[in-house]
Image (spheres, helix red, strand yellow):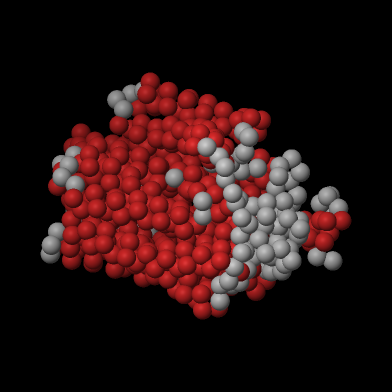
């Protein structure tokens, strides 16, 4: 008897049921039974939102060649976007230098990254209510506008606004396509498909820098942004046209229910305000923005954490987040995510794992490039190669993880037995190895451990969140997971900055020779000054030892928080995805 047959016969979740799929959340209209969710006798889910229904109807008409085209072109879009994003990161210092206003640019960069991360929350509702093509097109428009503004900007204010448009669009395009992959892949293969669309980063990590350099040495950085302002929409257009073509076929075939709206303009505004949960989204996005910004901006305030502005932002941010939770639980006519689904131990466990992983990463990775340049004496290029080990290794090993999930039909064992423990091992070993007079080969070894384990965690936590829900809520649970990651990253950065400012300057003053102690603040503030002291000199040895002390505390912190991630993974249900059908139509 299948899992869905057992659910139809009983509402209780037995031990036998528990490892097969999502639970029945009784207090919300959240269906996981065969009749409401994935029955083969039903072409589309009639209780799903319009955007989900459109995608389910569309995939009914997809041929094998359609699937091949879609996945090849999604890979091409990811390749172009990742190449463009790598180039943008390389060009940004030259843009800010041209304006000579670094502090304002740094502040707006923080704001743009936060807004870009939070934009996935309303985008999830756009994809579910209006449709995948519409959300994808809106995000391509935002990214293109951002690139055009960066190409034509003449002051830092314009560049700052361009960054906001760009990061909203860039994150949105990636997110929209990942939802399409979730729509068109079985749970058994989804981890592998997610790894597949991330694989361009293995290539573009190496070519983004040379592309940026060629523009800088040639027509200038403006043409770098301008080129991709043309290339990006041209590359994305075939995917959008393909979506619309298949959707039109589905409508012509009568696969979509006929929807007649006799609403007035005011009634339509009210209807979409409820469907989008506008008030709830305003509460959570405002709350998160106010809560996250102080973690990055407190250092720009004269009184730091004691600044009234910082205190007010944190307090009001927390209050708005509490208000969001109460509103969604008791007042919202239509919730952003069913409360019972959010509190499901697998979904919440995946969210906590994502948050703790980002807390840990931002603690141990902060100041890493500076450390290997100063203490290990590597060049800038060599430092970039070592720093890229994580991105390349994680993308590569995520493919292996996807294959293992496909083969075994399980994902929990990979995270619990390899992902989190090996990450803890890699970071823990660096407590010993990330010190002066230690061969850099040991650091590289630890980076490889962390990279392979990191690729495992990313794939398994996303699979866990998606496996615990129905097709209707896949976009929402991934957006919420991204929100938890943003919170974790902000907290991790703050902890790293607190350790750095609390340990490095004090130890520097202690270790410096007596005749150079007065220079400790100058040395602390400048990487170039640190590198200017000769290797083997008393001052350089003092700098190295101060780095080692600060790094030791960061690594201890980064290792410790993963205990929470280990407990969160242990709480996941051991869902068998091999034979679990979540999506409809022709899928991989």
Asked if residue 421 is positioned above or below residue 265 in the image, the reply reads below
- Residue 435 shows in the view: no
Residue occupying image coordinates x 43% and y 35% = 289
Residue 511, percent from left and from top? 30, 41
- Residue 143 shows in the view: yes
Where the C terminus falls, by quadrant?
Answer: bottom right
Query: In the shown orientation, is residue 430 left or right of residue 277?
Result: left
The residue positioned farthest toward the right in the image shown: 9
Residue occupying image coordinates x 57% and y 45% = 261
Count of numbered marks: 0
Query: In the shown orientation, is residue 26 left or right of residue 216?
Result: right
In which quarter of the view is residue 411 placed? bottom right
Asked if residue 88 is positioned above or below residue 297 in the image, the reply reads below
The residue positioned farthest toward the bottom in the image shown: 65
Residue 28, percent from left and from top? 71, 42
The residue positioned farthest toward the left in the image shown: 218
- The answer to which of 283 and 400 lies nearer the viewer is 283
The residue positioned farthest toward the front in the image shown: 262
In which quarter of the view is residue 381 placed? bottom left
Asked if residue 153 is positioned above or below residue 197 in the image, the reply reads above
Query: In the shown orientation, is residue 573 left or right of residue 228?
Result: right
- The answer to which of 503 and 349 lies nearer the viewer is 349
Query: In the shown orientation, is residue 164 left or right of residue 277?
Result: left
Residue 393, percent from left and from top? 45, 66
Residue occupying image coordinates x 14% and y 59% = 220
- The answer to which of 587 and 559 lies nearer the viewer is 587
Residue 303, percent from left and from top? 33, 24
Where the N terminus falls, by quadrant?
Answer: bottom right
Residue occupying image coordinates x 33% and y 47% = 165
């Amino acid at each position: 008897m299948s899992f869905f047959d057992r659910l139809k016969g009983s509402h209780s979740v037995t031990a036998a049921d528990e490892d097969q799929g999502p639970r029945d959340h009784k207090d919300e209209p959240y269906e996981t039974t065969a009749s409401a969710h994935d029955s083969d006798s039903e072409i589309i889910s009639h209780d799903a939102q319009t955007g989900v229904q459109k995608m389910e109807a569309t995939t009914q008409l997809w041929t094998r060649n359609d699937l091949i085209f879609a996945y090849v072109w999604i890979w091409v879009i990811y390749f172009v976007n990742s190449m463009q994003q790598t180039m943008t990161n390389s060009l940004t210092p030259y843009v800010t230098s041209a304006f000579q206003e670094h502090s304002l640019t740094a502040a707006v960069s923080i704001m743009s990254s936060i807004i870009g991360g939070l934009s996935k929350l309303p985008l999830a509702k756009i994809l579910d209510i209006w449709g995948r093509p519409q959300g994808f097109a809106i995000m391509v428009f935002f990214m293109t506008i951002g690139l055009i503004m960066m190409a034509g900007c003449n002051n830092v204010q314009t560049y700052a606004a361009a960054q906001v448009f760009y990061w909203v669009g860039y994150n949105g395009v990636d997110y929209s396509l990942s939802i399409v992959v979730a729509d068109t892949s079985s749970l058994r293969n989804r981890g592998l498909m997610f790894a597949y669309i991330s694989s361009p980063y293995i290539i573009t990590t190496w070519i983004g820098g040379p592309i940026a350099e060629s523009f800088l040495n040639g027509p200038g950085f403006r043409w770098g942004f301008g080129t991709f302002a043309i290339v990006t929409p041209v590359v994305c257009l075939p995917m959008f046209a393909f979506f619309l073509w298949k959707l039109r076929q589905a409508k012509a075939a009568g696969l979509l229910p006929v929807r007649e709206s006799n609403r007035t303009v005011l009634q339509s505004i009210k209807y979409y305000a409820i469907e989008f949960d506008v008030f709830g989204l305003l509460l959570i996005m405002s709350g998160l923005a106010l809560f996250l910004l102080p973690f990055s901006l407190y250092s720009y305030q004269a009184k730091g954490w004691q600044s009234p502005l910082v205190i007010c932002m944190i307090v009001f941010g927390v209050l708005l987040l509490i208000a969001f939770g109460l509103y969604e639980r008791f007042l919202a006519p239509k919730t952003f995510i069913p409360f019972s689904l959010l509190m499901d131990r697998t979904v919440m466990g995946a969210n906590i794992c994502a948050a703790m992983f980002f807390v840990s990463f931002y603690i141990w990775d902060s100041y890493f490039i500076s450390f290997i340049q100063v203490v290990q004496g590597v060049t800038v290029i060599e430092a970039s190669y070592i720093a890229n080990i994580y991105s390349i290794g994680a993308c590569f090993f995520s493919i292996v993880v996807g294959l293992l999930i496909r083969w075994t039909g399980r994902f929990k064992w990979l995270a619990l037995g390899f992902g989190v423990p090996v990450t803890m091992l890699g970071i823990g070993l660096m407590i010993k190895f990330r010190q002066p007079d230690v061969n850099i080969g040991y650091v590289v070894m630890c980076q490889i451990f962390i990279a392979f384990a990191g690729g495992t965690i990313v794939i398994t936590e996303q699979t866990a969140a998606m496996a615990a829900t129905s097709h209707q809520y896949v976009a929402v649970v991934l957006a919420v997971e991204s929100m938890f990651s943003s919170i974790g990253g902000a907290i991790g950065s703050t902890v790293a900055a607190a350790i750095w400012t609390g340990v490095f300057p004090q130890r520097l003053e202690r270790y410096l020779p007596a005749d150079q102690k007065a220079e400790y603040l100058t040395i602390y503030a400048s990487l170039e000054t640190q590198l200017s002291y000769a290797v083997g000199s008393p001052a350089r040895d003092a700098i190295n030892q101060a780095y080692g002390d600060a790094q030791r505390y960061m690594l201890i912190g980064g290792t410790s928080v993963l205990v929470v991630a280990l407990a969160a993974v242990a709480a996941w249900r051991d869902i068998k995805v091999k034979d679990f059908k979540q999506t409809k139509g022709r899928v991989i």
